[in-house]
Amino acid sequence: MSIDQEKKNISLYSPHLIELMQAVFDKGLPFRFQAKGGSMSPFIKDSDILTLARFSGDYSIGDVAAFVRPEGKKLVVHRIVAKKNNAYLIKGDNGFGQDSLIPKENILGRVIKVDRGTKNISFGLGPEKHLIAFLSRTNLLPVLFFLPRMSLSLLRKIRNF
């Protein structure tokens, strides 16, 4: 990778991205960046453009939040699935494991918009976010989304056998 390419791409694992996001938020502006990975699929997919905003109130169950993992200083975007005192249990929609309790001060902002190509994807950020959070916390969400797909794939293989 050339130096010019390196300057254009700031990794989600870079403290520079976190500093840049905080500087933009300090000016009262939203921050946009490209999602990497599949931990929030199908609601947020790899390469979607996320718009985040700083939020000074309490976060709600179901909000999709950008936070810094205390142990690795890594930026992560996952869904809030529970609240305990002044910390939040946060989890990716597409997995069975969950992040540890994240202190409120580690949350940088919440996702307010998802763009996929020319489409604005709002499903998962509206009132349905509460149901999605419940299904995610109970590990039913990955099963509900991927079990039918796996079953169809298996049926096609059997039919073609």
Image: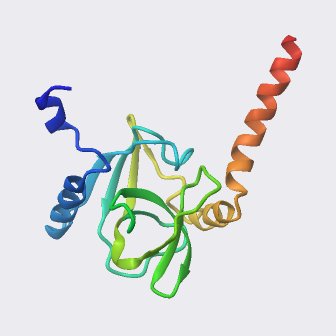
Q: Position of residue 62 (x, y in %)?
A: 54, 67
Which color mode does the image show? Answer: rainbow
Residue occupying the point 11% across, 30% down: 4
Q: Nearer the viewer, residue 132 or 137?
A: 137
Q: Is 121 rendered above or below residue 67?
A: above
Q: Position of residue 80 (x, y in %)?
A: 52, 68
Residue occupying the point 52% across, 48% down: 39
Residue occupying the point 17% across, 30% down: 5
135 left or right of 116?
right
Q: Position of residue 41 (x, y in %)?
A: 55, 45
Residue that extends furthest to the front in the rendered view of this protein: 71
Q: Is 15 rendered above or below residue 60?
A: above
* Count of marks, rendered view: 0
Residue occupying the point 58% across, 62% down: 98
Quadrant in the picture for residue 55: bottom left
Q: Considering the image in quadrants, where does the C terminus appear?
A: top right
Quadrant in the picture for residue 129: bottom right
Q: Is 46 rendered above or below residue 98?
A: above
Q: Considering the image in quadrants, where does the N terminus appear?
A: top left
Q: Position of residue 31 (x, y in %)?
A: 25, 56
